[in-house]
Image (cartoon, grey):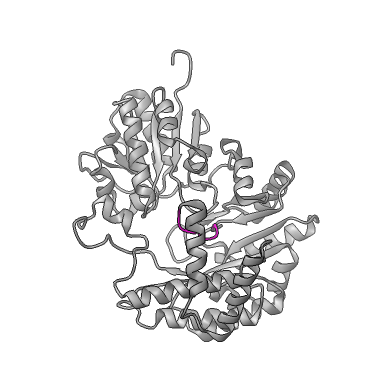
Amino acid sequence: MTGKRRPVVLYQPRDLGAVMPLGLLALGSWLRGDHVVIVDGRFELAPEARVAGLAQGALCLGVSVRTGAPLLEARRVSAAARSARPGLPVLWGGAHAALDPVSCLETGVVDACVPGAGEEALAAAAEAVGAGRPLRSVGGLVTADGELAEEAPPPATLWPRADYGLLDVERHFELRGERRLDYCSSRGARDGPAWMAIRAERVVAEARELAERYRLAEVLFQDRDFFADPDRVEAIARGLLEGGGTLGWQAGARPEDVLAAAPERLRLVAESGCRRLHLDIQAGAVPRDLLLEAGARLQAAGLAARFAFHVSPPAIEPAGLAVAVSTARKLSALDGRFETPIRRAWAAAPLPGPHAGGALEGWAAGEGPPWPDAGAERRLARAAFFLAEAQRAPGSRLGQHLVRLLALVRVRLGFFALDAERVLVEVSSLLRTGRSRRRASRD
């Protein structure tokens, strides 16, 4: 590596969905003075070999981890990198590193975790490694020797413009089947202490430039709380509308955002190119009447929406599934453009049993294990399947049309038992592909 800068390698484990690794993109864009290589496991046939090859000359390896199955791949890739170069510093960040850094450090292949905002901590870690200093000297890290540094606060200044040249955006477009780009204009939640957002003028200018550079059909705002500042949202909508063109966009919202917005503001959002709002709903946490009122207001404004219901086990929320199904059916009847997927709520703790106590295997299995109540598990699977099929775009094959038609009838009647067609679809998929049928990719 004489005469060359050693790269900071950032790895995104494979996962369902098509969202770009915006967390790693933010880190790489922050490290403007360093050579950064982002590896997305979704596009690698042999991710361990790819990262191991880069590790031999790397400054350090950073891995983004979330609770669930991707944890095991993160461990395999980190172990492969450590085998290729035993002295390579390995840092894990992301949702799981913040939730339970101990389970990450116990793997033996992780030197430190970043439990909070990662930009400044990773930059300081890269500087320390380059200077030969130990990671325990860096603030904002939880190190393998058990020392807990003070959690790093979010950056005091707004993050730099995202350098999309660090990603293979064409591969992402291919994965989605459309030229849709993820963009983050804010960070944190409105009820948190450190919500920050890019000014509306900069958001509009960057969206336009990115649309022209990559010939975009849509920009997907992947903010945790895009509507935290309603006036900013209106300014973004007006800027996109005044700019002309046909750039579409989507964003997340809360039901209360829709209910608080004046009808003219919702119409402005629709006129500016917003094609859909995404609302994550914890079943039972939001009254059904409020959700139906939000749906009525979105319909009146001409806005499509995706109401994603997250259902807890009956032992936690006895009526959660029934309420979610009932509300989903009413919303889908209200507007044919509304999508109402139903899925398990993420586990808040590792599974009980031999992996209890925070071990990585327990967390890896803890995203969506079957419910102990077999009857409730079957009802969840049936409702999720038929709602998804009823709201799926018509396929090109006769069988797809028939399944969709039957699903539409079942959703209208609310009858999901005796689900022979669901079993046939799952068996057919298993015979054709050798694996269970995958759900539609989530943006």
Q: Is residue 273 above or below residue 18?
A: below
* Quadrant of the rendered image containing residue 268: bottom right
Q: Can residue 284 be seen at all in this image of the molecule?
A: no
Is 437 one of the magenta-colored residues? yes
Q: Where is residue 124 in the image (x, y as percent from the top left)?
A: 39, 35
- In the picture, measured across the screen, residue 41 lies left or right of residue 247, that is left
Image point (51%, 46%), residue name: 21
Quarter of the image containing the C terminus? Answer: bottom right
Q: Where is residue 88 in the image (x, y as percent from the top left)?
A: 33, 28
Quarter of the image containing the N terminus? Answer: top left
* Foreground pick, 396 / 315: 396
Q: Is residue 234 above or below residue 218?
A: below
* Quadrant of the rendered image containing residue 441: bottom right
Main secondary structure found in the magenta portion? loop
* Foreground pick, 107 / 424: 424
Q: Is residue 134 above or below residue 340?
A: above
Image point (42%, 40%), residue name: 120
Q: Where is residue 145 in the image (x, y as percent from the top left)?
A: 20, 39
- In the picture, measured across the screen, residue 14 lies left or right of residue 335, that is left
Image point (69%, 45%), residue name: 210
Start and end of the magenta stretch?
A: 435-441
Q: Can residue 100 be seen at all in this image of the molecule?
A: yes
Is 240 one of the magenta-colored residues? no
Q: In the orientation shown, which residue stands out farthest toward the right?
A: 244
- In the picture, measured across the screen, residue 232 lies left or right of residue 314, that is right
Q: Position of residue 200 (x, y in %)?
A: 65, 56
